[in-house]
């Protein structure tokens, strides 16, 4: 039964007829006396109005069909008589005291023209201006500006701006959007549920979801990688956020438990906010660690991780065994033999690590310019280590490894993206220590045991670091503990090391002179 | 005979529909407006009206005003030895009004239609009904204040075929309603408002500024000085409606100082409050799907709507429209009386039909799943959208959240925010589902029925088993239930209320006492007059008392009119 029928009209009725018919029916189906009847009539009235609106906009009427109002035609309802006079509310009332506002000349309300609202309004400029303010100002300041904005008193204009405001909130970064969401939606009337503007609410929901997620993402990141997290956790976070760092990845692979933690953090971040995870995390690193910690499939990333760890621990065990053998009287005289025996695994491990991880970097970053200097430095570093190992023999190798590990442990990651300089500083450090050991060994010969030389070298390593940190802290005016996290200039490291080396040389020579 | 009552924040009125017109009843002092103030006398008797209002200044601990703002909450006030709930205070005012009506009609009144702000929530409406019951009358119908004003205005002006907006800025609440009148049908399209915005807030802002500028600590002021200051500021606020500047004499700590406020300064102070006026107007227009150009009139009701700052803002927002102040203090009561007549099916009102809307959205709490498979709960799914014409009945279907779900806890909320955390919980319903339910399969159908008296009925049908569960939202934590009402009715009846004949005398005494407090310069004179009047009262000579009272009133009028030396 069509709504027009329910009101007792035919389909071609106009607005005045619809209203009259509705008014007439209401007298028999009053809301307080006949709720169901009233609802039926009222819904039919609304449906008729809707159809009249469509008709006005040029749409065809829908065919007569049952639009869900299942109703028995009421036998008493006749066709409305359009000739019936207007129902007049004939009654005599004592007149109320109606007072209009006193009109003063020049008062805008009295002229009937509001001179303050200009007809021309640049919506784009407004949206741009709003966007700038949202990025830089507090919510209170933005609200005050919006409320005082003269052009926004015109309600139609304000309503029409809703779409551009939502567009702008979507392009805003998550923190700014979160800060201003409530004030902006409240001012533009978008903070209440509404059936008609569901498109709007879907978009607003998505925005809120986005910065809700972004907030979760930040929270996970902060708990794992904030200032009070352990060094290892901070390194893991950096590994995921920053581009590939050869040394960092090596450390994470080598140390027990850290790959697992990396995988766990990655999963937590992706669960909190997949969108942020794909934009903020470094994609190749993310891919690598995803595959490396994926227990379900055996991918080559995972294999490489396993292989590197195996090589490292194998050589470490080998060297430990050599130390024990030495105690038990194994012939330690031939440096080459020991070097060959235990430097090989070490060298192999280093070479393998360099090659494999370099390949990973090359593969993942092959869209960026290949950094040959980095590759050269890495190779040089590896060779230097090998040379040192050869020259210094078994105990030398041990000493070298110890100092290198101490170097790693004592340093945190330097500046982002400077893996070249990191590699360079590593190579420089390794070479420096190796040279120091060599020099000391040659100069001192057998007058001092190699064990003590190793200790001196370790002291040298720590000492140079400490001096370097103190100098850096004084130069930059920061606390000493924070100097650990900063990368000093490369030349300063050389300076310090060179100075210490010179001091050591002098001491040794003096001793040699007096001793000899 | 059904009466119509306007139970306002600052004033209350009572009337009925008689003959062909609404008619208001005067109180014992001859005024149509009775201040909504309650006070306890030294003898434990209750005073309501102007005498209580004067006692706000002389006995602030024993008097209370503006308690309409606390309706729907549990806030209790201590007067004398007894604690009063807001419903009880309103009931005392209602009793006084009913006594006035009964004196004029000569018969007992059993039923009334009371006006409430359109934006009053469920708990507040229930509290108003409870107040009626505590006053001994039946209150079946509540009429929304803007609708009542529109009734009075529309019928008086014989409006037909016009869409207009009613802005009601009263003492404590701000309501906006958009109405259309055609062929004797008065239809409300949309209502919106702010329950915490009214003339009192503008007064509050002035008081803060005054204390700040004069270096007074408002919180440290003794209550009677504070009440005095507020009453003077009220006068100044009214003066600003017609003059550009007002002067307030502040007497604190023994010294008398002057504070000046001009209209520009007041505009600046009131700016945050005025900004709050914008949102309800915009929302009502939006919900009615109209623009300001579709309105033919702007009708302003309520004492505070006289403020020029308010009218300027409205004209700015709505453009060039005739702004009409219908008699701001009486329109709502006249409209409520018409509504009472309509309920009583008065013959003269046969042709008039009124429809109103439910001003807030009703729905349930739901959870949603996004495209990543993450579930978030606490979303508000509307079932009856705001500004649906009542009575209304709507139903929606909802799905289970996970496979094998056995039950759903339905939480029913009222409000506008998309998050249920910001809305008001009305009730809960536990529903058992059919066995072997699958995720995203329609599990229940929920039907909300909201009747013309504002009672919400929730019915849920479990699809699959056909089991129905029903909840009629009667009980509300902030509101009294049946048993409590009976209890309190008994205890309220025990309170002594002064008979009407005495009220005029008591009012005069209260007035002298108040003037004594205010006017340091006239104290000895006032004291003499008080002593003489109490002496005359003791004589119990009716005629003499009336004569003395008349003369005294005139003398007091002269003093008040004279201003401060």
Image (cartoon, rainbow, N blue to C red):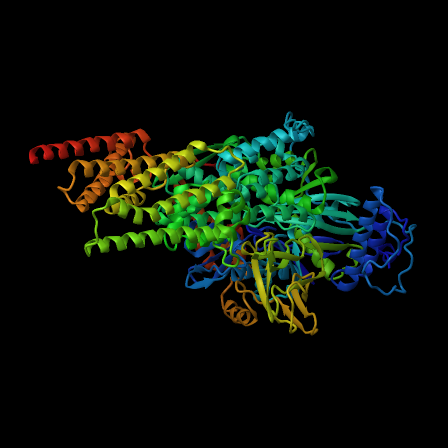
Pick the front one: B13 or A14: A14
Total numbered labels:
0
Q: Residue at x 60, y 39 (%)?
A: B306
Pick the front one: B463 or A340: A340
- Does A218 appear above or below B337? above
- Does A138 appear above or below A313? above
Examine the rendering and report whether any part of residue B383 can be seen: yes
Q: Is residue B168 left or right of residue A330?
A: right
Q: Quadrant of the C terminus of chain A?
A: top left
Q: Quadrant of the N terminus of chain A?
A: bottom right
Q: Residue at x 36, y 46 (%)?
A: B220
Pick the front one: B416 or A117: B416
Q: Is residue B403 left or right of residue B523?
A: right
- The image quadrant that residue B253 belongs to is top left
Give x and y (percent) for residue B392. Answer: 72, 60
Q: Residue furthest toward the top?
A: A106
Give x and y (percent) for residue A333. Answer: 20, 47
Give x and y (percent) for residue B402. Answer: 60, 65
Examine the rendering and report whether any part of residue B509 can be seen: no
Pick the front one: B73 or A291: A291
- The image quadrant that residue B275 belongs to is top right
Give x and y (percent) for residue B438. Answer: 65, 67
Q: Is residue A341 left or right of residue A300?
A: left
């Amino acid at each position: 039964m069509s709504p027009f029928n329910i009101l007792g009209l035919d389909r071609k009725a106009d607005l005045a007829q619809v209203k009259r018919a509705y008014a007439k029916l209401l007298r028999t189906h009053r809301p307080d006396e006949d709720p169901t009847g009233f609802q039926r009539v009222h819904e039919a009235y609304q449906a008729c109005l809707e159809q009249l609106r469509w008709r006005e906009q040029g749409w065809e009427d829908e065919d007569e069909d049952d639009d869900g109002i299942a109703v028995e035609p009421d036998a008493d309802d006749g066709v409305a008589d359009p000739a019936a006079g207007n129902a007049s509310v004939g009654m005599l009332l004592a007149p109320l005291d109606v007072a209009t506002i006193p009109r003063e000349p020049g008062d805008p309300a009295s002229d009937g023209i509001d001179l303050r609202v200009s007809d021309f309004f640049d919506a784009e400029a407004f949206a741009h201006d709003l966007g700038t303010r949202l990025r830089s100002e507090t919510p209170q300041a933005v609200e005050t500006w919006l409320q005082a904005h003269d052009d926004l008193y015109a309600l139609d204009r304000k309503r029409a701006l809703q779409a551009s405001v939502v567009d702008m909130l979507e392009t805003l970064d998550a923190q700014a959007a979160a800060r201003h969401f409530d004030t902006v939606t409240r001012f533009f009337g978008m903070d209440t549920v509404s059936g008609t503007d569901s498109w709007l609410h879907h978009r607003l929901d998505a925005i809120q979801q986005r910065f809700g997620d972004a907030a979760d993402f930040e929270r996970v990141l902060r708990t794992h990688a904030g200032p009070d997290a352990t060094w290892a956790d901070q390194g893991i976070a950096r590994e995921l956020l920053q581009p590939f760092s050869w040394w960092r990845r090596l450390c994470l692979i080598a140390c027990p438990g850290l790959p697992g933690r990396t995988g766990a953090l990655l999963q937590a971040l992706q669960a909190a906010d997949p969108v942020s995870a794909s934009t903020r995390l470094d994609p190749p690193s993310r891919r690598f660690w995803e595959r490396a910690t994926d227990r379900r499939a055996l991918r080559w990333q995972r294999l490489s991780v396993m292989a590197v760890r195996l090589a490292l621990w194998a050589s470490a065990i080998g060297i430990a065994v050599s130390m024990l053998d030495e105690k038990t009287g194994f012939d330690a005289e031939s440096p080459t033999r020991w070097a060959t025996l235990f430097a090989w695994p070490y060298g192999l491990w280093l070479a393998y690590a360099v090659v494999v991880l370099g390949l990973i970097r090359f593969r993942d970053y092959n869209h960026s310019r290949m950094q040959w200097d980095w590759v050269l430095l890495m190779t040089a570093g590896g060779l230097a280590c090998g040379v040192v190992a050869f020259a210094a023999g078994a105990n030398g190798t041990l000493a070298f490894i110890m100092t290198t590990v101490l170097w790693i442990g004592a340093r945190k990651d330097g500046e982002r993206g400077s893996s070249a300089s990191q590699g360079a500083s590593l190579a420089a450090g390794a070479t420096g220590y190796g040279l120091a050991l060599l020099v000391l060994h040659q100069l001192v010969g057998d007058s001092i045991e190699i064990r003590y030389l190793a200790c001196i070298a370790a002291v040298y390593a720590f000492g140079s670091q400490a001096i370097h940190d103190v100098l850096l802290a004084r130069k930059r005016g920061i606390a000493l503990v924070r100097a650990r996290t900063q990368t000093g200039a490369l030349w300063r490291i050389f300076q310090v090391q060179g100075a210490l080396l010179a001091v050591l040389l002098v001491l040794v020579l003096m001793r040699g002179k007096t001793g000899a | 005979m059904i009466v119509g009552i306007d139970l306002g924040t600052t004033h209350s009125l009572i009337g009925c529909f008689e003959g062909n017109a609404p008619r208001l009843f005067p109180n014992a002092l001859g005024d149509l407006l009775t201040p909504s103030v309650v006070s306890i006398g030294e003898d434990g008797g209750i005073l309501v009206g102007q005498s209580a209002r004067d006692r706000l200044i002389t006995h602030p601990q024993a008097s209370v005003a503006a308690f309409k703002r606390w309706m729907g909450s549990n806030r209790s006030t201590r007067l004398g030895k007894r604690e009063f709930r807001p419903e009880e205070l309103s009931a005392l005012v209602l009793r006084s009004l009913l006594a006035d009506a009964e004196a004029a009609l000569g018969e007992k009144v059993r039923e009334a239609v009371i006006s409430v702000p359109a934006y009053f929530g469920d708990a507040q409406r229930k509290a108003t009904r409870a107040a009626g019951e505590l006053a001994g009358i039946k209150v079946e119908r509540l009429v929304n204040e803007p609708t009542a004003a529109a009734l009075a205005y529309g019928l008086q002006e014989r409006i037909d075929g016009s869409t207009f907006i009613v802005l009601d800025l009263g003492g404590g609440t701000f309501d906006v309603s958009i109405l259309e009148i055609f062929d004797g049908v008065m239809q409300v399209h949309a209502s919106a408002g702010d329950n915490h915005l009214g003339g009192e807030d503008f007064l509050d802002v002035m008081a803060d500024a005054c204390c700040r500028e004069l270096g007074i600590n408002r919180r440290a002021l003794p209550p009677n000085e504070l009440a005095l200051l507020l009453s003077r500021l009220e006068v100044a606020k009214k003066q600003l409606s017609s003059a550009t500047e007002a002067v307030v004499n502040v007497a604190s700590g023994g010294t008398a100082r002057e504070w000046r406020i001009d209209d520009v300064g007041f505009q600046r102070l009131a700016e945050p409050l005025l900004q709050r006026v914008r949102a309800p107007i915009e929302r009502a227009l939006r919900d009615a799907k109209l623009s300001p150009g579709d309105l033919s009139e702007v009708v302003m009701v309520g004492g505070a709507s006289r403020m020029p700052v308010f009218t300027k803002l409205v004209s700015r927002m709505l453009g060039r429209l005739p702004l009409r102040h219908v008699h701001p203090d009486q329109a709502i009561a006249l409209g409520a009386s018409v509504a009472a007549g309509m309920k009583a099916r008065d013959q003269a009102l046969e042709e008039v039909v009124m429809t109103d809307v439910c001003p807030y959205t009703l729905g349930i709490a739901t959870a949603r799943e996004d495209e990543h498979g993450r579930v978030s709960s606490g979303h508000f799914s509307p079932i009856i959208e705001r500004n649906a014409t009542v009575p209304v009945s709507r139903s929606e279907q909802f799905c289970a959240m996970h496979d094998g779900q056995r039950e759903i806890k339905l939480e029913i909320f009222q409000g506008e925010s998309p998050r249920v955390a910001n809305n008001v919980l009305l009730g809960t319903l536990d529903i058992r589902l059919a066995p072997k339910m699958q995720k995203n399969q329609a599990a229940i159908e929920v039907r909300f029925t909201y009747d013309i008296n504002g009672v919400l009925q929730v019915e849920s049908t479990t699809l699959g088993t056909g089991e129905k569960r029903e909840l009629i939202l009667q009980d509300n934590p902030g509101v009294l239930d049946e048993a409590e009402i009976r209890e309190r009715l008994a205890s309220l009846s025990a309170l002594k209320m002064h008979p009407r004949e005495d009220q005029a005398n008591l009012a005069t005494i209260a007035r002298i006492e108040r003037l004594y407090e205010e006017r340091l310069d006239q104290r000895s004179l006032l004291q003499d007059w008080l002593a003489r009047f109490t002496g005359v009262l003791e004589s119990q000579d009716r005629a003499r008392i009336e004569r003395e009272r008349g003369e005294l009133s005139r003398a007091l009028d002269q003093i008040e009119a004279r201003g401060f030396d």
